[in-house]
């Protein structure tokens, strides 16, 4: 098969890496890809939003299967566009991807079907939102409705912070149109967990749970990012809690989407908080997590192409899907300044040394320049260590992370530390 992956970040590098292992795959193309993906696939310089050009390219090759990585093209209907041309594509249609594209749609859906999530109110008017906010107390959470690269959420510890976040979103419009509508919701206390599932309609096949670290600094300090590191499995979280989340949240949500005439096919990502009253939904995403994919896909023993083809052919429920018992830890190396503005074009050294140690290096924001690999994004690399348990995987990830050098390299030193504290 000739496969094309849409996207160019660390998640897409992990997807390409997993597809490459399949003996059904002859060639992989990636649009637009990055400097790391280029070692496994042919990178095609077409943006993820250029549906007409992507379709033209897919017909020309011809591509047998398209796999979509990021949220933006899904929210804009890339799956509908390829399906209209009869090109097989894996991912949710626009109406199902709305579970990520609009937080208000997601919250209303969960409320309607009685699925556990934080209490909330939604607003389109700044004065009304402010009046409501002033009747609440901190901590409290303010969210822009639309997509904002994972940064449209403020967990405010004080009322001043909450009012500033609301003003930034609705008046200063720092997230543009995404801030025209906001959700103000109850703060949920507990540990977070991400469960990604292969979903086809009501069929839900959960992957092993993972945990992300969103704030930029150690100890969960500083602003939220797209994710600074992940690990899987979660040895300190009982399987009964994971099962409860699947039965009470993920399966009912898949079913609710079917009832609403928006059947979901693709990877459904549940971001959950394990509260004292059990797991509750923080968010749903319509795609694999980044960097969750980087620790979950290396543990997948079944051929990813078989899973995708089974989904496309209505056989997902019958497939035997196997996972290795090995642990994986991903440490993100970021550019100084991220998630604010950051420099680009700094030369990266030590990649071969890190790989020689056995680490998997997934490129997130890199480019090639005169034969060198340089930084080209906020999140630059995901360094994945694997081992018999989290402790071993973690020390391998950090050894490899230390072998890689670029000016202004920033990473958290406490990824997966929670798992070891218990
Ligand atoms: P989201 O983009 O909705 O996943 O939010 C980003 C991050 O903000 C989450 O991963 C949580 O760490 C945090 N967060 C979001 N909503 C809540 C909430 N209701 N209570 C506590 N933390 C939250
Ligand atoms: N790592 C969180 C996300 O992909 O949204």
Image (cartoon, rainbow, N blue to C red):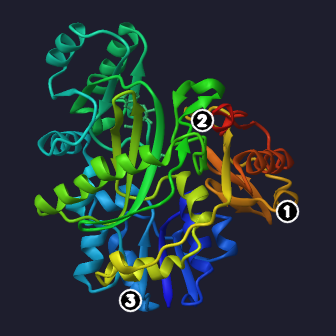
- Measured in 3D between alpha carbons, the distance from the residue under mark 2 to the one under mark 1, in whole angstroms, is 25 Å
- In screen coordinates, is 265 left or right of 128? right
Q: Is residue 196 left or right of residue 369?
A: left
* Residue 352 circle label: 1
Write the residue at 17% across / 55% down.
256
* Quadrant of the drawing holding the C terminus: top right
Q: Is residue 129 left or right of 371 when viewed as pictured?
A: left
Camera-side residue of 183 and 315 = 315
Tell me which corner region of the image, top left, top right, bottom left or bottom right, holds residue 133. Answer: top left
In which quadrant of the rendered view does residue 361 lie? bottom right
Q: Which is nearer the N-term, disc 2 or disc 1?
A: 2
Up/down of 400 relative to 165, above or below:
below
Where does label 3 land, which residue? Answer: 59
Q: Position of residue 339 (x, y in %)?
A: 55, 35
Badge number at residue 338: 2
In this view, the mark in front (2 or 1): 1
Residue at image location 55% in from the left, 87% down from the top:
25
Percent position of residue 229, x then y: 62, 43
- Are dots 2 and 1 in contact, CB under 8 Å? no
At a point 53% along the width and 41% down the height, the residue shown is 237
Image mark for residue 394: none
Q: Secondary structure at mark 2?
A: loop
Tell me which corner region of the image, top left, top right, bottom left or bottom right, holds residue 97: bottom left
Marks 2 and 3, the one that precedes in the sequence: 3
Q: Is residue 33 visible?
A: no
Q: Nearer the viewer, residue 194 or 7?
A: 194
Label 3 beta carbon within 8 A of ligand 2: no
């Amino acid at each position: 098969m000739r496969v094309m992956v849409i996207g160019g970040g660390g998640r897409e590098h992990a997807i390409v890496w997993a597809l490459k292992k399949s003996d059904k795959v002859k060639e992989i193309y990636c649009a637009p890809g990055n400097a790391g993906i280029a070692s496994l696939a042919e990178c095609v310089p077409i943006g993820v939003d250029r549906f007409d050009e992507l379709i033209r390219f897919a017909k020309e090759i011809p591509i047998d299967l398209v796999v979509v990585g990021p949220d933006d093209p899904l929210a804009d209907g890339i799956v509908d566009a390829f399906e209209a041309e009869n090109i097989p594509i894996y991912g949710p249609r626009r109406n199902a991807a709305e579970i990520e594209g609009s937080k208000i749609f997601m919250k209303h859906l969960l409320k309607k079907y009685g699925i556990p999530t934080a209490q909330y109110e939604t607003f389109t008017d700044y004065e009304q939102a402010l009046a409501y906010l002033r009747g609440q107390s901190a901590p409290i959470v303010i969210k822009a409705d639309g997509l904002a690269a994972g940064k449209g959420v403020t967990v405010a510890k004080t009322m001043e912070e909450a009012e500033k976040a609301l003003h930034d979103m609705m008046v200063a419009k720092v997230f543009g149109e995404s801030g025209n509508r906001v959700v103000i919701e109850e703060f949920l206390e507990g540990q977070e967990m991400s469960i990604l599932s292969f979903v086809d309609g009501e069929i839900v096949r959960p992957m092993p749970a993972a945990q992300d670290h969103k704030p930029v600094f150690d100890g969960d300090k500083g602003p939220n990012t797209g994710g600074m590191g992940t690990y899987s499995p979660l040895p300190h979280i009982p399987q009964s809690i994971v099962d409860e989340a699947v039965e009470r949240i993920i399966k009912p949500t898949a079913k609710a989407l079917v009832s609403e005439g928006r059947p979901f096919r693709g990877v459904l990502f549940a971001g959950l908080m394990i509260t004292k009253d059990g797991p509750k939904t923080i968010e749903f995403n319509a795609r694999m997590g980044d960097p969750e994919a980087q620790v979950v896909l290396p543990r997948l023993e079944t051929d990813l192409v078989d899973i995708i083809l089974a989904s496309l052919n209505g056989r997902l429920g019958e497939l035997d899907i196997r996972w290795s018992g090995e642990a994986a830890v991903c440490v993100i190396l970021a550019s100084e300044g991220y998630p604010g503005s950051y420099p680009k074009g700094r030369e990266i050294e030590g990649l071969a040394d890190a790989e020689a140690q056995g680490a998997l290096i997934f490129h997130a924001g890199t480019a090639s320049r005169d034969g060198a690999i340089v930084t080209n994004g906020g999140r630059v690399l995901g360094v994945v260590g694997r081992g018999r348990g989290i402790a071993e995987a973690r020390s391998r990830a950090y050894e490899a992370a230390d072998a890689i050098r670029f000016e202004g390299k920033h990473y958290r030193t406490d990824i997966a530390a929670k798992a070891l504290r218990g």
